[in-house]
Amino acid sequence: QVQLGESGGGVVQPGKSLRLSCEASGFIFSSYGMHWVREASGKGLQWVAYISDAGSGTKYADSVKGRFTISRDNSKNMLYLEMNSLRVDDSAVYYCVRQPDSGRTFDYWGQGTLVTVSS
Amino acid sequence: DIQMTQSPSSLSASAGDRVTITCRASETIRHYLNWYQQSPGKAPKLLIYSASSLHSGVPSRFSGGGYGTDFTLTISSLQPEDFATYYCQQTYTFPWTFGQGTKVDIK
């Protein structure tokens, strides 16, 4: 079965960096576009970044553009989110999400990893 | 960015009730509208994609409709496990945006 497992969250000071990882299993990882979506406490869902199946195409929310970098290693079935210059308002649960090859939606979500940016 | 507005923001209902949630886009999104259900402390789950297609394994009491700017999610007979928060999402153009959520709780 499809499984997505995030890791790498934690408490970090403003201005610092953090790298999130997502391990995928149960499907052909290299055939699917992947996304990161975040949920700040009590704030609802926000799409963060997208990477194409081969990794050649990426898109970002304006709020993270230039600070966050999405990447993947298809040989390891791994998705990453490198987060630099972190701000307090980046604090959220970050979800790794799969986009099915047949459509524009999110069909499977990981359990999420919590990032807290605080001095 | 396309703004997605859900109504109501919250509602109280009883098991067995028919519930309808609406979602309005700030501009046309054709049929590129998805619905998700999120229970407390859990990741969201896909219910409906492309406005009206039921995701695999989702009970048939859930249905979606609409096109362009106005969309609905209907639960025909509310079950105890349906008390949760529901989000719409447009995937017509990046950035893909979500509505603010509709919390369905027990009356």
Image (cartoon, rainbow, N blue to C red):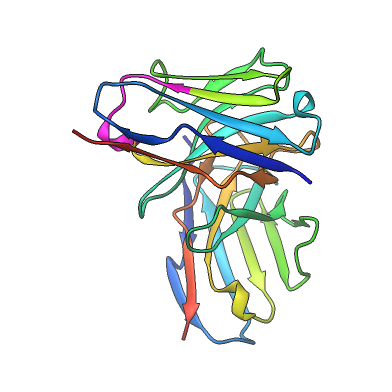
Residue at 38% x, 28% y: name it: A63
Relative horizontal placement of residue A82, taking residue B82 as reference (left or right) = left
Q: Position of residue A50 (x, y in %)?
A: 59, 27
In this view of the protein, which residue sits in the foreground, A44 or A86?
A86
Residue B96 visible in the snapshot: no
Residue A16 visible in the snapshot: yes
The correct choice, above or below, for B3 with respect to B58 in the image is: above
Residue at 18% x, 33% y: name it: A119
| Res A80 → quadrant | top right
Q: Return the residue found at the far top.
A: A56
Q: Position of residue B36 (x, y in %)?
A: 61, 56
Q: Position of residue A39 (x, y in %)?
A: 43, 46
The correct choice, above or below, for A86 with respect to A11 in the image is: above
Relative horizontal placement of residue B96, taking residue A25 as reference (left or right) = left
Q: Position of residue A48 (x, y in %)?
A: 49, 32
Residue at 45% x, 68% y: name it: B8
Q: Give the mark count.
A: 0
| Res B18 → quadrant | bottom right
Relative horizontal placement of residue B47, taking residue B7 as reference (left or right) = right
Residue range corresponding to the magenta coloring: A82-90
In this view of the protein, which residue sits in the foreground, B67 or A64?
A64
Relative horizontal placement of residue A114, taking residue A95 as reference (left or right) = left
